[in-house]
Amino acid sequence: MKGHCGRQAVQAFAGSLEGHKTRKGVLITTSQFSLDALDYVTRIEKKIVLIDGEKFAELMIDYGIGVTVEVTYEINRLDVDHFEEES
């Protein structure tokens, strides 16, 4: 993750939403958003969700997109019914 996605990129995205008469959008970067970009989306009328590289990777893992299972762990639970005496 090199560099930052700055306010100019977010402003350009907001402008493209206007061009499509849309009030909401999601902007994803593989890097990080600058503080200025994060501040900008809080002060505009449009609802823009910013997803940085770290959050994007988390979502990919959570939803199994573009990832391969490396190791699976099995967690056992004690079955207390097994130890109860029958009447």
Image (cartoon, rainbow, N blue to C red):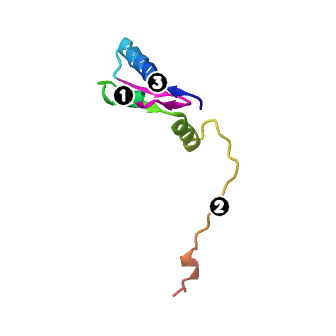
**What distance separates the C-alpha of mark 1 from that of mark 2?**
43 Å
Residue 49 occupies which quadrant of the picture?
top left
Q: Is residue 20 above or below residue 80?
A: above
Residue receiving disc 2: 74
**Residue 4 screen position, x and y as percent:** 52, 28
Task: Give the crowd class for mark 3: few <14, some 14-19, many >=20 residues within 10 Å.
Answer: some
Secondary structure category for the residue under label 1: helix
Left or right of 6: which side holds 75? right
> Which numbered dot is residue 85?
none
Say whether disc 3 or disc 2 marks the residue closer to the N-terminus: 3
Mark positioned earlier in the residue sequence (1 or 2) = 1
In the foreground, 38 or 15: 38
Quarter-of-image position of residue 85: bottom right
Amino acid identity at mark 3: Gly
Q: Is residue 79 magenta?
A: no
Left or right? Give the position of 36 relative to 71: left
Quadrant of the rendered image containing residue 39: top left
Mark pair 3, 2: CA separation: 43 Å
Measuring from the top left, give residue 86's x and y in whole percent: 54, 85
Instruction: Give the magenta-colored segment's residue range.
Output: 24-35
Q: If you read the primary sequence from the N terminus, does the residue marked by circle 3 or circle 1 appear first?
A: 3
Q: Which residue is mark 1?
A: 41
Q: Position of residue 84 (x, y in %)?
A: 54, 83
Amino acid type for the residue under numbered disc 2 = Glu
